[in-house]
Image: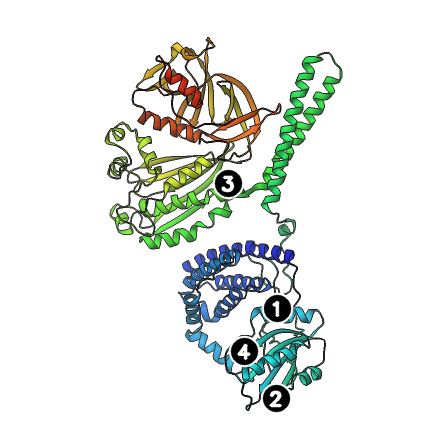
Amino acid sequence: MTQFSDERGAELRELFFETAQELLQTLNDEALKLEKHPSDTETVRSIRRIVHTLKGDAAACGFRELSELAHEFEDALAVETSASLASLAEVAFAAADIFSDMLLSYRGKGKLPSANALLKSIRALADGPQGKKSRKKKSAAPGTTTVWTEYEKLAIESAAAQGKRVFHITAQIDPLCAMPIAARQLVLNAVASQGEVLGTRPEPGSTENSKKIELLLASERIAEQVAAKCKIPTVISHVGVETIAASTKKAKTPEPLPAPETTTAAPIEASVAAEGTEEWPAEEPEFAAPVQPATPAENVLRVDAERIDNVLNLVGELIIGKSMLQQALNEFAKRYPKEAIRGRFADAMGFQARVLNDLQRSVMKVRMVPVEQLFRRFPRMVRDVSRLCGRKVELVISGLDTDVDKTLLDAIAEPLTHIVRNAISHGIESPEERVRLNKPAHGTIRLDAHHQGNQLIVEIRDDGSGIDPERVKARALKQGIASAEEVARLSEAETLDMVFRPGFSTAEEITEVSGRGVGLDVVRSVLNRLKGSAEIQTRVGEGTTFRLKLPLTLAIIKALLFRVEQRLYAIPLNAVAEIARAKESDLHRVDNYEVLQLRNQVLPLLRMGRRGTERTDHRAGKIFILVIHFGERKLGLIVDAMEGEEELVIKTLDDQTVATDLVSGASILGDGRVVLIMNLAAIMERFSKAGREQGNALISGLLLSHAERAQLNRSPSAAPAMSSGEVRQ
């Protein structure tokens, strides 16, 4: 069989892993349909086509175990034997799980999972009354059948395509031969000298004490030459060599699958006649004709995500270059205000900026994928978890065509999974309880995604029991997550926010789904990393809505720049509700907070640097207040000066550079200055935590360095500065 080069083989396997995941997702989708409509023969045919494609692809990549298991399942999926069996959907789900585990093992070069339970279920399908009848008809055919693996069948076809003769050799070992295993090796060596051995029975290394050996040989020699080579005196008593010929009957073109797939060979049933030339049976064509892709698929090109990221990084460098040119042009205009060529420079810069913006949008669109790729995993998960919890749940999905950055889509898979599992185990009541409450026995979970400005909004809504704030407070006290004094001061929104605390759980007992204290804190940590937020809306007895807000992309943002203590910082522009100006005398103190009355609303403030009375430069005048919104909460950040708006290319920072969670990244401006991008989620968390822990001390100085805080705290008239991490610049 022709072998691919290592590089080409690796590419083929990567393509297989990608398409196999799509096939398994489609298999889960079809199994869900079959579970609702067990007698739908068209769904059974669709499952069989999926398994057939997976079998052929696995064999082409050399994954023999997966190919053979899929072959067993395909045989049991004959419509006339399986369509009426209610257990077929369960077997399909089990097969999808085992196939997925095998793919993970192949990819990680680990130990393959046991498939014994699945094989038992598959054979139970085939052993049904109709299956036995079908096999009885097949067994009535004359002759002895030798079953070759799918991998060996593809090797036969490959050799035939190269113009080689393929022989089925049967050698009978002499009854007086004392060492049959050694005799098999002698025959194998003799046959190997005549061409390429494609398969043997018994397989090499087998300790089976058989007096018969069968081989598949691809060779350019004639049958008489091969037979003569196999006749070993005192070892082989009889040799039979038969030529395998491919059927010339035109194969049918399989129906295209819902998911993209690679064109693979159809199964081949090798049948060995008693003598003469053998052919593949007509009912199973040797090759499926090439699948004609649908017209839209002709324009689909698979590109590695890393390549797209490289292009995006280069676009980011171009944006920095554009800023540098703009800075130089501004300086040129100041120095030579009457220079005629200045206008031409400005026109060229404007044209470059438009083209660069179009290029950036185009690259960003390449990274965008429909959220359907993530959402279609949830019906199977909801089905499994609802069964474990004894619930009846219907999942309603909308917004499947909403586009989102591929990196972001992969990152939110885990948070969404936790929220949906929690909705089933904690939110939806049991069918009996729902009927008692005059609710439908089936609970409903709605999963929706849509764009709002330059944000992605994902909503998970259920019609269950809702979240009781008083119960949350009681559990927080019982688990030691909050003190009685702290709980007493919490508002309803802050109480609901407690469910995101590490270790918090309302489950009374530990189950497979809940009660282990690992859950919604994962949601909060992932959202903080993605610069997103989560909101909870709930009504006891009616249901709960989790609303996740995320940026559409993680690579390039529009930001507002400001200064604190002569250092340059930035926050995402979409998080800024407004910029207010006020005098120090307009600020008031409530407990340990500074507040400002802004249009009949009390706005809590967080001073990022020192108070005006603590400054050495004695700057007077109004102060700048950035009013930011994070979820349903608003906070005013007091900063020293504004620097304007910029489009920033986010560069990640390692822990050696930044030792605080207040900074989520950095960027380089056109003039070479470095700007630190603030993590608003961490700022809000630090503000809330300081309010609980600092007693009567005024909360301020969030962005002061360690040295500046120490100097400020030594001053007898100064309020203690709020602790923060150190940023090394």
Nearer to us: label 4 or label 3: 4
Q: Are marks 1 and 4 in contact (CB under 8 Å)?
A: no
- Determine crowd level at label 1: few under 14, some 14-19, many 20+ residues with C-alpha closer than 10 A: many
Side (left or right) of 450 relative to 694: right
Q: Name the residue carrying label 3.
A: 408
Q: Are marks 3 and 2 in contact (CB under 8 Å)?
A: no
Q: Are marks 3 and 1 in contact (CB under 8 Å)?
A: no
Q: Earlier in the sequence, mark 2 or mark 1?
A: 1
Residue drawn where x is 52% and y is 79% of the image: 138
Q: Quadrant of residue 598?
A: top left
The answer to whether residue 97 is visible is yes
Residue drawn where x is 31% and y is 18% of the image: 590
Q: Quadrant of residue 254?
A: bottom right
Side (left or right) of 429 relative to 109: left
Q: Earlier in the sequence, mark 1 or mark 4?
A: 1
Label 1, label 4: how many angstroms apart (C-alpha)?
19 Å
* Labelled disc at residue 238: 2
The answer to whether residue 399 is visible is no
- Determine crowd level at label 2: few under 14, some 14-19, many 20+ residues with C-alpha closer than 10 A: some
- Secondary structure at badge 1 equals helix
* Labelled disc at residue 154: 1
Q: Name the residue carrying label 4.
A: 202
